[in-house]
C-alpha cells in the first residue's frame, strides 16, 4: 500500500444551527493506480465522530474505509509562554537598571554634600585670613546649588520612568500568569480514508462534519414610517470552534434537536393515597409547556429561504467570513414590508402613558424566531422590544414604545366613607376619572385598561355604581376594558364609580 498522503481540504460551505454547525470541506487529489490512504488532519476537537461523512468523486475510483481518530499536539502557546517569560525578565531588568541609575544619582548627592562641607570650612578660613572674597564664596555656593538641583531633577525623572516600568512589569506578569494557566496539550481530530483507482485519475474529496461551539440568533430592526411597518431580519453568528471560517457559502438553519433523542412516549400517571412506607414515585407523564425628494434607498442583499427536513434554511446571499473569536458577526436574512393595524394600549393605574402597538401578519414564507428587536420611528431610535416565534401567515403584535402625543390622566374624584351605621354596615364610595387626549392630527384607536377591587371576604361587597361609557370587556377579576376612537385633537373621558360595603367592625385593607 502506498504511503498515506496528507490532504489540504479547505472549508467551502458552512451551515449554522442554533446549537452547532455543519462544515463542508472540498479539495482535489491526484490518485495513482492502486490504493491511496489519505489523511485530513487538524480538525477541531469538537467534531462529532458520528457526523463525519466522506465522499470521493472521480473516474475509475472507489472509496474504501473511513476512520476518525483523536490526537494530541504540542501546545501552540508554548512559544508564546516563552516569549512572555522573556518579556517579564526584560521588564525586571529595566526596573533594576532604573534603581541602579537612581543609586548613582544618590551617591552624587552625597558627594556634593561632603564637598560642600569641606569647601565651606576651607573658604571660611581663607576669608578670615583675607585670601578669599565673598564673591568666591557666592560662586562656589551657586555651583553646588546648580549641581544639586540638576541631580534632584534627574532623580524625579528616574522615579517617573520607574513607575511606568513597574506598571509594564505588572502587566507582563499578568499576561504570563494567564498564559501559564491555559497551558495545555491541544486535542485535534483527523479523518483517514482509503481511495482505490484502477487507473490514474483526478478526484475531488468532500468531507463534512458537525461541530459544537457555534450558533446563530435572530435580531430585528422594526421601523415605522407612516402606516407601513418594515422588519429587517438579521442574523448574529458566533463561533468558537477553533477553526476560522473563510468567506464561503453560509447557510442558517432553524432545525433544532428535540428535548428527547427519541420520540416522547407517555407513561401511566398514577395517583393514590399515601403509602405507609415511602416508595419511589413512578414516572410522571409528560405535560406540554406553555409557550422632500430623496434618493431611493439601496436594496438590501437578503438571504434566500429554503427548506431542509423539519426546519427552514436561509442561504446568505454574500459569503461571510466568521473567525473563531467568539465575537458577533451579523448578516441580513430578509427585509419585510408588512401592512399593520395600529392602536394604543394604556393602563393609567400603572403608568399614565399610551403604548403604540402594531398588529401584523407575517405575509412572508419566513419563520421569525424569538429575538430582540430595536424599534425606530422615522429613523429615530425609540427603544427595544422582543419578537416571539412567528410562523408564515401567523398574526403577531409588535410593541412600538410610548407615544407622548397621546396624553393620559387618571384622577381620584371621590373617596368617602359613610358615617351612619345602618344595620351595622359602612359604605366606602370611590370614583375615578380617566381623560385621554389625542394631540396627533389623525385618528387614534385606544384600548384603556383599569379595574375595580375584588373582595376575598364574603362579608365585604364590591358593587359597581357607574361605568361611563360602558366597557367593551369586563370579567370576574374586576378588569375593565374600554375601546376609544379619537380624532386628531379630540379628548375622551371615562368615569367609573364603585362602593365597598363592609361590617362596621371589619377593617378593609387594599383600597
Image (cartoon, helix red, strand yellow):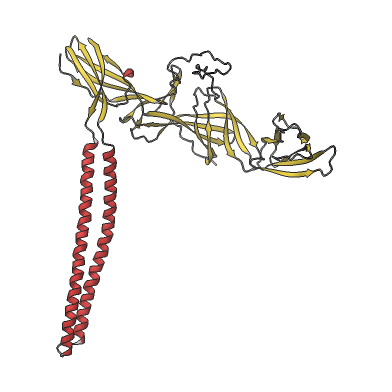
Viewer-side residue, 308 vs 270: 270
Q: Residue at x 21, y 72 (%)?
A: 147
In percent of width and height, residue 21 lies at: 37, 25
Name the residue nearer the viewer: 177 or 172.
Answer: 177
- The percent coordinates of residue 134 (x first, y second) are 21, 86
Instruction: Out of 159 and 405, give the one closest to the viewer.
Output: 159
Q: Is residue 252 above or below residue 100?
A: above
For the point 27% across and 47% down, the residue is: 172
> In the shown orientation, is residue 387 left or right of residue 115?
right
User: Residue 79, image x and y in percent?
Assistant: 21, 38
Foreground residue among 217 and 149: 149
* Total tally of numbered discs in the picture: 0
Work out whether residue 114 can be spotted: yes
Note whether residue 59 is visible.
Answer: no
Q: Quadrant of the C terminus?
A: top right
Q: Is residue 474 above or below residue 425?
A: above
Left/right placement of residue 474 relative to residue 278 reads right
Residue 163 pos. (x, y %)? 28, 57
In this view, 41 is above or below 504 = above
Query: Which corner quadrant of the image does residue 453 belong to?
Result: top right
Where's the N terminus, which quadrant? top left
Q: Quadrant of residue 141?
A: bottom left
In the image, is 49 to the left or to the right of 424? Answer: left
Question: What residue is rendered at 26% in x and 43% in y?
Answer: 176
Amino acid at each position: 500500500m502506498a504511503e498515506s498522503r496528507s490532504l489540504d481540504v479547505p472549508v467551502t460551505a458552512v451551515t449554522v444551527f442554533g446549537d452547532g454547525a455543519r462544515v463542508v470541506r472540498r479539495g482535489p487529489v491526484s490518485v495513482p493506480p492502486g490504493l491511496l490512504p489519505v489523511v485530513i488532519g487538524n480538525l477541531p476537537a469538537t467534531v462529532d465522530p458520528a457526523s463525519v461523512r466522506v465522499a470521493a468523486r472521480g473516474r475509475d475510483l472507489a472509496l474504501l474505509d473511513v476512520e476518525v481518530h483523536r490526537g494530541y499536539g504540542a501546545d501552540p502557546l508554548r512559544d508564546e509562554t516563552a516569549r512572555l517569560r522573556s518579556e517579564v525578565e526584560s521588564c525586571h531588568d529595566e526596573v533594576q537598571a532604573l534603581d541602579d541609575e537612581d543609586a548613582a544619582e544618590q551617591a552624587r548627592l552625597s558627594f556634593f554634600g561632603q564637598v560642600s562641607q569641606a569647601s565651606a570650612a576651607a573658604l571660611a578660613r581663607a576669608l578670615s585670613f583675607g585670601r578669599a572674597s565673598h564673591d568666591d564664596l557666592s560662586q562656589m555656593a551657586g555651583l553646588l546649588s546648580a549641581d544639586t538641583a540638576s541631580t534632584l531633577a534627574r532623580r524625579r525623572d528616574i522615579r517617573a520612568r520607574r513607575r511606568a516600568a513597574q506598571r509594564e512589569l505588572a502587566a507582563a506578569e499578568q499576561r504570563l500568569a494567564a498564559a501559564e494557566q491555559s497551558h495545555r496539550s491541544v486535542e485535534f481530530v483527523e479523518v483517514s480514508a482509503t481511495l482505490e483507482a484502477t487507473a490514474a485519475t483526478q478526484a475531488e474529496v468532500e468531507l463534512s462534519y458537525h461541530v459544537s461551539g457555534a450558533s446563530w440568533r435572530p435580531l430585528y430592526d422594526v421601523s415605522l414610517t407612516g402606516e407601513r411597518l418594515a422588519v429587517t431580519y438579521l442574523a448574529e453568528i458566533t463561533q468558537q470552534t477553533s477553526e476560522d471560517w473563510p468567506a464561503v457559502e453560509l447557510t442558517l438553519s432553524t432545525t433544532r434537536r428535540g428535548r428527547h433523542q427519541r420520540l416522547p412516549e407517555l407513561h401511566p400517571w398514577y395517583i393514590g393515597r399515601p403509602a405507609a412506607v415511602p416508595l419511589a414515585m413512578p414516572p410522571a407523564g409528560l405535560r406540554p409547556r406553555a409557550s422632500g425628494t430623496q434618493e431611493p434607498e439601496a436594496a438590501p442583499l437578503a438571504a434566500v429561504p429554503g427548506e431542509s427536513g423539519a426546519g427552514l434554511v436561509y442561504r446568505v446571499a454574500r459569503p461571510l467570513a466568521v473567525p473563531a473569536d467568539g465575537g458577533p458577526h451579523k448578516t441580513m436574512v430578509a427585509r419585510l414590508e408588512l401592512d399593520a393595524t395600529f392602536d394604543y394600549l394604556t393602563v393609567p393605574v400603572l403608568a399614565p402613558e399610551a403604548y403604540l402597538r402594531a398588529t401584523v401578519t407575517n405575509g412572508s414564507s419566513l419563520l421569525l424566531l424569538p429575538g430582540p428587536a430595536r424599534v425606530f420611528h422615522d429613523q429615530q431610535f425609540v427603544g427595544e422590544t422582543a419578537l416571539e416565534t412567528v410562523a408564515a401567515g401567523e398574526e403577531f403584535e409588535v410593541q412600538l414604545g410610548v407615544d407622548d402625543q397621546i396624553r393620559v390622566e387618571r384622577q381620584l374624584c371621590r373617596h368617602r366613607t359613610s358615617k351612619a351605621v345602618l344595620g351595622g354596615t359602612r359604605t366606602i364610595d370611590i370614583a375615578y376619572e380617566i381623560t385621554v387626549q389625542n394631540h396627533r392630527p389623525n385618528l387614534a384607536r385606544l384600548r384603556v385598561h383599569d379595574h375595580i377591587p375584588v373582595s376575598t371576604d364574603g362579608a365585604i361587597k364590591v358593587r359597581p355604581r357607574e361605568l361611563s361609557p360602558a366597557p367593551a370587556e369586563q370579567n370576574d377579576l374586576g378588569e375593565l376594558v374600554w375601546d376609544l376612537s379619537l380624532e386628531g385633537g379630540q379628548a375622551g373621558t371615562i368615569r367609573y364609580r364603585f362602593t365597598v360595603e363592609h361590617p362596621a367592625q371589619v377593617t378593609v385593607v387594599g383600597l
